[in-house]
Amino acid sequence: MNPADTLEEARRRIGTCDDLDALKEIERELVGRKGIVASLLAEIPKLDPSERKARGQEANALKQAILGLLKERREEIEAGRLDAARRAEGFDPTLPPPRARRGSLHPITQVTRELEDLFVSMGYEVLDGPEVELDHYNFEALNITKDHPARDAQDTFYCDEEGRLVLRTHTSPVQIRAMEKREPPFRVIAPGRVFRQETTDASHDHTFYQMEGLVVGKDISVAHLIGAMKTLLRGIFGRDLEVRLRPGHFPFVEPGFELDARCPFCPSGCSVCKQTTWIELLPCGLVHPNVLRMGGIDPEVWSGFAFGLGLSRLVMLRHGIDDVRHLLDGDLRFLEQF
Ligand code: PHE
């Protein structure tokens, strides 16, 4: 057979071979020691010297071409085997890859960032404070003395035997830290995590989020407080809501209020406002003179207002979440909705 026909024949046989052992056999027949190419080479010495070089080159080219075909086919068969093995395991190489799953921001993070932007646009500074706090900042400097009944209302996790360190029960200690480091006038907010030793239920958790606000300046009054709270509500609910103040007692504000807003979800009563058309939104008040003094600020010259927004509660209101514990239990079925 001439080299061209041999190559054709080799191409056909190799191309239709599906088995590595059979391929080895073909390799032996074509390019093995006693194979076709070997016999072509063996004939060269018998040829006329003028033809030897060309025939030698031809035979070698044929050998290289066949080796190339063999290698290609071997790889194809091996890949096919891998495929078959994967298919047997239930892997379908023709399926598109699974869509990459994207995370999302936790609803508390979302609302925190929105409110930070809103307050920064009004000239407030965003502050952080320690979650493990000194009793002094969490209570004493906020006008809550050792035997004050307000301590019972804020069931505290103590961190040491002497009761010097606590997990902060509110973000208000950041008020004192802010006053110590600043000269009035100033405006700050302090969003963060707070802790209370409570039996958990649908509306109580041992860990939740608040955002403290504090403004200190000349002649700051309840009117400033109401103005700021109305702006806050517009930021949260996207429109103006009527507000009302009820007296509320917190040792660090005087006067102290509970601020209610007209229910943004109904005209005349629904389950969110418990049929009252008002929702209890946030405690606030004018900073108590003792607290200003504790923060190193002269209450004869300066005054201020403070508020404590419950971020966890706000997120629940906004999304109609009926159990506060969903916010922290990390269940993807819940989290994926945001
Ligand atoms: N720190 C108070 C609490 O968590 C809320 C509050 C803040 C009240 C600021 C008035 C002013 O109970």
Image (cartoon, rainbow, N blue to C red):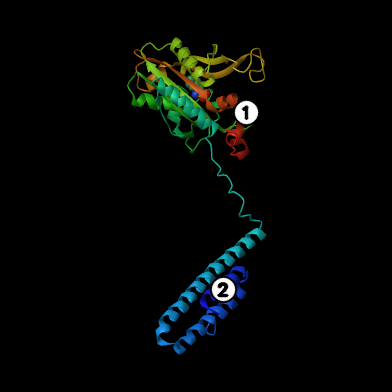
Find the distance from the CA under tag 2 to the CA under tag 1. 73 Å
The structure residue drawn at horizontal position 62% and vertical position 28%, both measured from the top left corner, is 321
Label 2: which secondary element: helix
For marks 2 and 1, give the one nearer the viewer: 2
Does any atom of ligand 1 lie closer than 8 Å to the CB of label 2? no
Question: What amino acid is at disc 2?
Answer: Ala
Q: Residue at x 63, y 59 (%)?
A: 86
Residue 160 at x, y percent in the picture:
48, 38
**Label of residue 43 in the image:** none
Image point (52%, 15%), residue name: 257
Residue found 64% across the figure and 62% down from its top: 84
Which of 138 and 108 lies nearest the eye of the viewer?
Answer: 108
Q: Nearer the viewer, residue 229 or 16?
A: 16
Residue 129 drawn at (x, y percent): 43, 31
Q: Quadrant of the N terminus?
A: bottom right
* Residue 71, percent from left and from top: 52, 70
In-image side of 210 versus 141 (left or right): right
In the picture of the structure, the residue carrying the numbered disc 2 is 10
Pinpoint residue 264: horizontal percent, then vertical percent.
59, 17
